[in-house]
Image: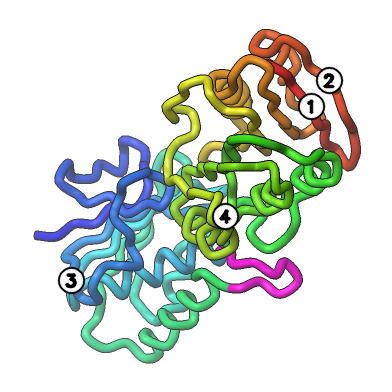
Amino acid sequence: MTTLLYGRPPVVFDPPGDATQTSPLIPDSAALEAQDPGSADTVMTYAPPGVLERRYVLALALRALKVGGRLDVMAPKDKGGSRLGKELKAFGVEVAETAKAHHRRCIVFKPETAEGLDAAIDAAIAAGGPQFVPGLEAWSQPGIFAWDRIDAGSALLAEHLPPMKGEGVDLGCGYGALSIVALRSPAVTKLKLVDLDRRAIRAARENVTDERAKVWWSDARTLEAKGDKDFVVSNPPFHDGGAEDRRLGQAFIRKAAELLKKGGVAWVVANRHLPYEAELNAAFKRVRLVAEAGGYKLFEAVK
């Protein structure tokens, strides 16, 4: 029996231990979009909060299921769960819906025939899949941070970043916007792009084609650090599963310091309300507030 799992659900979801993980946010997981149509007996999904992203995942799950296969979906009520049943019915399938522990849970058995099902699946996959974004002029995908726009924090960092040199790391690279800026300097010899999101990694590989760049699918917090890098650029995340978690950015700051050699420099941008100053001052020899604008603050920190 083939069971696919998407995401890390709460204990009440109770996924089987032998399920194949397919979340793009878990390094080394399988890809849900790569599963053969009609190959899975069961798909268990902890649905993401973004509308396009969630419908994309639901469509991929339905496509992967065998006829008669079971789709089991859960989402917090305030992060898409209240709309989950309606969105599934829009695919033309029957839905059994329950509520538990501030979540909505929906069960669907894939029908042999359902009017418009294939067309609805194809449309959701097209809307939520990898795409070239006009205006952004880059490849991206719903679910990636700031997937269809230039984030104001990254824009602030790009505006003030001086020419970098030597070997560097872009921690939490997203689709590669800051890396493109850093690589404008001919003095940069190597740049490692790191992100937890497989979708971001795929987009970055499309967008950053400079031979000096290498793209790495990894959790930045557990990245091996040898203390041999000349610079780090980072717009750290501060949400985990939709909830604010300041420890994420603090962990990125500590990792940046671990990566750098003595005299190396980190350029870090953060939302103005986030208390990163203590972490920066503890990890670095010298910290300078470079700019504040649009609700963001930009730091230069020297190891």
Residue 37 found in image quarter: bottom left
Report how far apart the C-alphas of labels 1 and 3 lie in the structure. 50 Å
The answer to the question of whether label 4 and label 3 lie on touching residues, with beta carbons closer than 8 A, is no
Residue located beneath label 4 in the image: 144
What label sits on residue 299 in the rendered view?
Answer: 1
Q: Identify the residue shown where x is 68% and y is 63%.
A: 148
Q: Is residue 80 visible?
A: no
* Residue type indicated by callout 4: Ile
- The reply, left or right, for residue 289 in relation to residue 276 is right
Residue 242 magenta-drawn? no
- The reply, left or right, for residue 194 in relation to residue 13 is right
Is 283 drawn above or below residue 217 in the view shown?
A: above
Quadrant (top left/top right/bottom left/bottom right) for the C terminus: top right
Classed neighbour count for the residue bearing mark 2: other residues with Cα under 10 Å, few (<14), some (14–19), many (≥20)? some
Report how far apart the C-alphas of labels 4 and 1 lie in the structure. 24 Å
Nearer the observer, 208 or 176 = 208
Please tell me whether mark 3 or mark 2 is closer to you in this view. Answer: 2
Please tell me whether mark 4 or mark 1 is closer to you in this view. Answer: 1
Is disc 3 placed on a helix, strand or loop? loop
* Residue type indicated by callout 1: Phe
Q: Earlier in the sequence, mark 1 or mark 3?
A: 3
Q: Which residues are magenta?
A: 132-141
Is 37 drawn above or below residue 73 in the view shown?
A: below
- Image coloring type: rainbow
Residue located beneath label 2 in the image: 288
The answer to the question of whether label 2 and label 1 lie on touching residues, with beta carbons closer than 8 A, is yes
Q: Identify the residue shown where x is 37% and y is 84%.
A: 117
Quadrant (top left/top right/bottom left/bottom right) for the N terminus: bottom left
Q: Earlier in the sequence, mark 3 or mark 2?
A: 3
